Image (cartoon, helix red, strand yellow):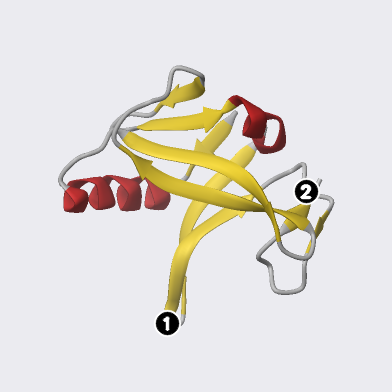
Amino acid sequence: MITVTNTASKKIQANLVKRGKGVGIRVGVRTTGCSGLAYVLEYIDKVNSDDITIDMKDFVIAVDSKSSVYLEGLGIDYVRQGLNEGFEFTNPNEKDRCGCGESFRI
């Protein structure tokens, strides 16, 4: 369902260690922006009973059931470009992305 590059996996693990707690990340979508949807990634301390979970080697990815339809085949990477760095999402279901890259449409 969701793949994570080695670089992103290392960053997630490092952030969990830095936090001093947590079991993984929750990935989802929210309504916002020009195109309608935006990705959300947050660190979590527990998995909700209605989450769909993906067990990685050192952490868990949790996805709420409402977001799962939008995230099928999602790839997560961590990239550095100049002074900017952050998680990058590649979704084969995207039909369009707004000009600023903050939101997308399926």
45 left or right of 26 in image: left
* Marks 2 & 1, CB-CB < 8 Å contact: no
What amino acid type is highlighted by mark number 1?
Leu
Q: Quadrant of the N terminus?
A: top right
Would you place residue 17 above or below residue 80 in this image?
Answer: above
What amino acid type is highlighted by mark number 2?
Glu
Of the residues under marks 2 and 1, which one precedes in the sequence?
1
Provide residue 33's location: percent of width, then percent of height.
Answer: 72, 63
Residue at point 41% right, 50% down? Answer: 8
Would you place residue 3 above or below residue 15 in this image?
Answer: above
Residue at the farthest top position: 49
Provide residue 95's location: percent of width, then percent of height.
Answer: 84, 51
Provide residue 71's location: percent of width, then percent of height.
Answer: 65, 37
Give the residue number, with chain letter if any, for mark 2.
Answer: 94
Would you place residue 62 above or below residue 11 in this image?
Answer: above
Q: Residues within 10 Å of mark 2 (few under 14, many from 20)?
A: few
**Disc 2, SS:** loop
Q: CA distance from mark 2 to mark 1?
A: 27 Å
100 left or right of 24 in image: right
Would you place residue 20 above or below residue 98 in this image?
Answer: above
Give the residue number, with chain letter if any, for mark 1.
Answer: 83
